[in-house]
Amino acid sequence: MSNQKEIFNAESYSKMELLRFTTAGSVDDGKSTLIGRLLYDSKSIFEDQMEAVKSSSERRGDENINLALVTDGLKSEREQGITIDVAYRYFSTPKRKFIIADTPGHIQYTRNMVTGASTANLAIILVDARHGVVEQTKRHSLIASLLGIPHVVVCINKMDLVDWKEDAFSRIKNDYKQFASKLNVKDINFIPISALLGDNVVNESENMDWYKGSTLMYHLENVHIANDHNHIDSRFPVQTVIRPHSDEYHDYRGYAGRVAGGTFKKGDEVTVLPSGFTSKIKEVEFAGEVAEEVYSPMSITMTLEDNVDVSRGDMIVRTGNKPEVSQDIDAMVCWMDEKNPVRINGKYTLIHTTRNCRCIVKEIAYKMDVNNLHKLEDDKNISLNDIGRIKIRTTQPLFFDAYSQNRITGSFILVDEATNVTVGACMIRA
Amino acid sequence: MAYTINHLNELEAEAIYIMREVAAQFEKPAILFSGGKDSILLTHLAKKAFFPAKIPFPLVHIDTGHNFNETIEFRDYLAKKLDVKLIVGSVQDAIDDGLAVEEKGANASRNVAQIPALLKAIEDFQFDALMGGARRDEEKARAKERFFSHRDEFGQWDPKNQRPELWNIFNGKKQWGEHFRIFPISNWTELDVWQYIAKENIELPKTYYSHNRPCIERNGTILAVSEHVQAREGEEVKDMQIRFRTMGDATITGAYLSDADTIEKIIQEVAAARETERGNRADDKRSETAMEDRKKEGYF
């Protein structure tokens, strides 16, 4: 296990990477125990938190310390003993800092799972060794695939309850692989664990000699995430224009934003969308320091050689590599509105990168059965927590890439024009 | 070239992205400045986000009147140094005007009384977005907080009806009279904050570093003696070597015995700490959901 001291010398933490992962699960599948175990064994639960959990457990009459109480924060969650919302948890080891998006696993919380998955590099899918691949396993995997999570770890849990037997593990692994062949996940790993007893979570199991792979923690610390961002197609959505109006920076016009893809450096020939003006990059910089080359997910400021018109919502791209430009968008949607389903011909506000416009839903192609990937072409009713495919037309062209190519330029949300609530999470198809 | 960035740079990039969204999406945004390290960190990030232009947000401080002198001095110094406008909302005024009630009893604090003072400042100045330095690792109700947290016209938070927040898309749309609380450093931990303060060499009030001062021990918490905290019967004033991990009201912010007088020592100490930094805040100990209850009413 990690030596806590190491984290804290500057040399070591200057090289720490950030890994965001998501877990989904429902009552009894051991998700909370697993998170509790990760936090506990990496010494990330503090004494006062542990005290609070202990005294709540006692008050509730729980037999053991209920590690689920570490993760359930809201009053109603603690009352009902379930996780309703996405809860974010943090821990670190000398190698990496981790952000867990902990979400409920039941179908009625699909939108929470989608939210947690939207920013994750990795998904942990929990399978109960006694029950094997079930509907919930498939649903979580589908969401991970749809949301473009690059790495999936299937943790086959409760191995202690199947006598640590290799054939139980192998059977589930094969079942899962067969199902996953329909998914779009590049990197899948399988780890037999017991979250309750700690086997293969942080420490290697002494009960499963037959397993030669890494522990979950080792995998989380070492999985290769450098390529999770798109470093090929250069995209820079402009957030705001920095104009100091001071004597020293009288003519300064800096375009502020976060690189959404590819790389940018001084001298690159760029095109501004939608105007189509071209120029060259004068400087890429951040907080007054010139950078040699910038890439996703850096927040930077860019200046151009020519005084062209650029404002919020515009996108600066490499002249030789432009995104799609269209007003007709074909997308998968996860619906999040509690009141109304997707309305054909319904009008919504659309937010894509730093750009806002209105749009109209022209067509609902199908609803997807999230338990088995079946396309229900006769079912056009996409309601809360449903996932489906829609076609929309926007009032202004969007500059986008397929979601499978770029999770930033390939995603957008729909907002209800009356209530301002976010109602749809959309992923653009190729 | 390996196209990766380290965790501190990624957290910084995220926070700066959010601040720029705030500047672009809102008409009258402000930074809620408590005088603590997290809000000082926000001003540093804001400076970097808009350089070479000035920080486009005023600082709003809700002064309980129970602050440490060092906090107030540092606040005034920082506002001047950054050349930003400082707006002070007074809890004392809110009490005098009958908007808030002074708590009675042995462990009374002005924590809850900040809420009406804050809401009054929001109304008076028509702020539509207030950025705060709250972090999700601080407290369990904050673990469920959004980056863009919607507040109704009464300033209330409805934890069960929060807007979903996907990817890096932030929906700041609102009706007239509503506003947003925005938390750019949601994903930072206490350790990240200290590592970043070290990396960027950010100046902090001296109270964060180990120093000697007269203290008393009350209900297991060390409190610094000041005009707001006096020894009661049976309590003994002792000179102690302490530092603060958070800076709230002098009446409720517990000190820690510490000899960490440099940032490196503080990082070591935070790393080895076995208690959360709010573990010593009397305001959170009132009940299991004390923070959630205050947040629903309009607290930070």
Image (cartoon, rainbow, N blue to C red):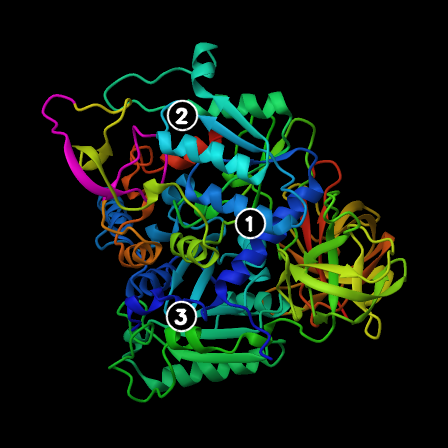
Give me the residue at 74% from left, 62% from top: A236
Disc number at residue A426?
Answer: none
- Mark 2 or 3: in front is 3
Q: Where is residue B73 in the image (x, y as percent from the top left)?
A: 42, 32
Marks 3 and 1 share the same chain: no
- Residue annotated with mark 1: B45
- Residue annotated with mark 2: B112
Pick whichever of labels 2 and 1 is earlier in the sequence.
1
- Residue annotated with mark 3: A11
Chain to which the residue tagged by mark 2 belongs = B
Give the structural element (helix, strand or loop) at label 3: helix
Does the rendering let one see residue A18? yes
- Mark 2 or 1: in front is 1
Task: Quadrant for residue B196, please give it.
Answer: bottom left
Give me the residue at 87% from left, 56% from top: A308
Give the CA separation, mark 2 to mark 3.
42 Å
Chain to which the residue tagged by mark 3 belongs = A
Chain to which the residue tagged by mark 1 belongs = B
Along the line of sight, the residue nearer the viewer: A280 or B89: A280
Give left or right: position of A350 versus A334: right
Tell me the amino acid under the disc marked 1. Leu
Above or below residue A262? Residue A59 is above
Magenta residues (range): B232-256
